[in-house]
Image: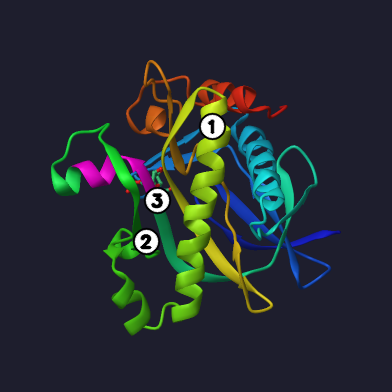
């Protein structure tokens, strides 16, 4: 499959067309951003680490019966994926309170959420990705009812599968953000799953091993991602 024109360049990944209109190439760059792009740095090796991490997770999810856009690794930093018609919503599932949930509700970080909670955010940089509810999503026509139901079902299934995989590596999956799109009418998991888009804590010490290290200036960002990867069986 040949990498052709640059279609879109996001904050951490670039997307290229291929010679097949149903497929695209995702290039994972070293760029790391937080706070709506207000903090940006280049972190050596991060593109490679996230590409391989994502490939491993997407493969595990596919084995568990979750439809994903991932096809195969093309190089250290490139992956071949299906071209989806993206739904402009972020699905966030939370097992433990952290981040914006704590700020919004004034709750303490670290509280167990039973059952896990689900939130939707509109993908809109100009508005800072506001939280929306399911009626907003349907009333404004951002997603069809049956697709939203499927996104929720898949989000909880992904959470169940990954919670267990991380736990076996001595890690708590605190929360994660998933994006979906349509491929030939079917809801399919898109984007990436890496420590850039989820929170992972060491089970015993509760040390943060995800992008919060970057957001909070704790250092050792890529080293933490590699540590998480090694603990669950990713080879870099
Ligand atoms: O910031 P907040 O607590 O809402 O984030 C919830 C989860 O979603 C975190 O794991 C965060 O890394 C992820 N997220 C993301 N991209 C965004 C917003 C949140 O990956 N634009």
Name the residue that disc number 1 marks: 166
Mark toward the start of the polypeptide (2 vs 3): 3
**Could you tell me residue 3's position as x and y percent?**
79, 58
Most extreme residue toward the right is: 1
Callout 2: helix, strand or loop? helix
Q: Position of residue 155 (x, y in %)?
A: 49, 56
Callout 2 touching callout 1 (CB < 8 Å): no
Gap between marks 2 and 3 measured at Cα:
21 Å
Q: Residue furthest left?
A: 106
Q: Residue at x 42, y 58 (%)?
A: 91
Q: Secondary structure at mark 3?
A: strand
Please name the residue shown 54% across and 50% down the image: 158
Query: Residue 7's image quarter?
Result: bottom right
Magenta-colored span: 93-102
Which residue position holds label 3?
93
Q: Quadrant of the C terminus?
A: top right
Residue hosting label 2: 125
Callout 3 environment at 10 Å: few (<14), some (14 to 19), or many (20+)? many
- Which label is found at residue 192? none
Viewer-proximal residue among 208 and 203: 203
Residue 224 counted in the magenta span: no
Tell me where residue 21 sits by quadrant. Answer: bottom right
User: Which percent across, then down, holds residue 11?
Assistant: 49, 50
């Amino acid at each position: 499959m040949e990498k052709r024109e640059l279609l879109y360049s996001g904050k951490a990944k670039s997307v290229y067309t291929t010679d097949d209109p149903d497929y695209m190439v995702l290039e994972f760059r070293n760029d790391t951003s937080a706070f709506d792009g207000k903090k940006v740095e280049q972190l050596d090796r991060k593109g490679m680490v996230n590409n391989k991490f994502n490939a491993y997770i997407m493969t595990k999810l596919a084995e568990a019966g979750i439809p994903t856009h991932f096809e195969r690794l093309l190089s250290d930093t490139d992956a071949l994926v299906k071209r989806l018609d993206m739904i402009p919503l972020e699905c966030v599932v939370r097992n433990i309170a952290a981040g914006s949930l704590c700020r919004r509700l004034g709750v303490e970080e670290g509280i167990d959420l039973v059952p896990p909670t689900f939130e939707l955010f509109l993908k809109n940089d100009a508005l800072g990705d506001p939280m929306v509810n399911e009626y907003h999503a349907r009333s404004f026509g951002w997603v069809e009812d049956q697709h939203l139901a499927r996104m929720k079902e898949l989000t909880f299934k992904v959470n169940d599968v990954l919670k267990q995989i991380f736990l076996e590596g001595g890690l708590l999956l605190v929360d994660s953000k998933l994006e979906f799109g349509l491929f030939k009418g079917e809801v399919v998991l898109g984007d990436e799953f890496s420590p850039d888009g989820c929170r992972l804590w060491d089970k015993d010490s509760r040390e943060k091993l995800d992008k919060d290290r970057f957001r909070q200036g704790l250092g050792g960002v890529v080293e933490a991602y590699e540590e998480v990867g090694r603990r669950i069986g990713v080879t870099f």
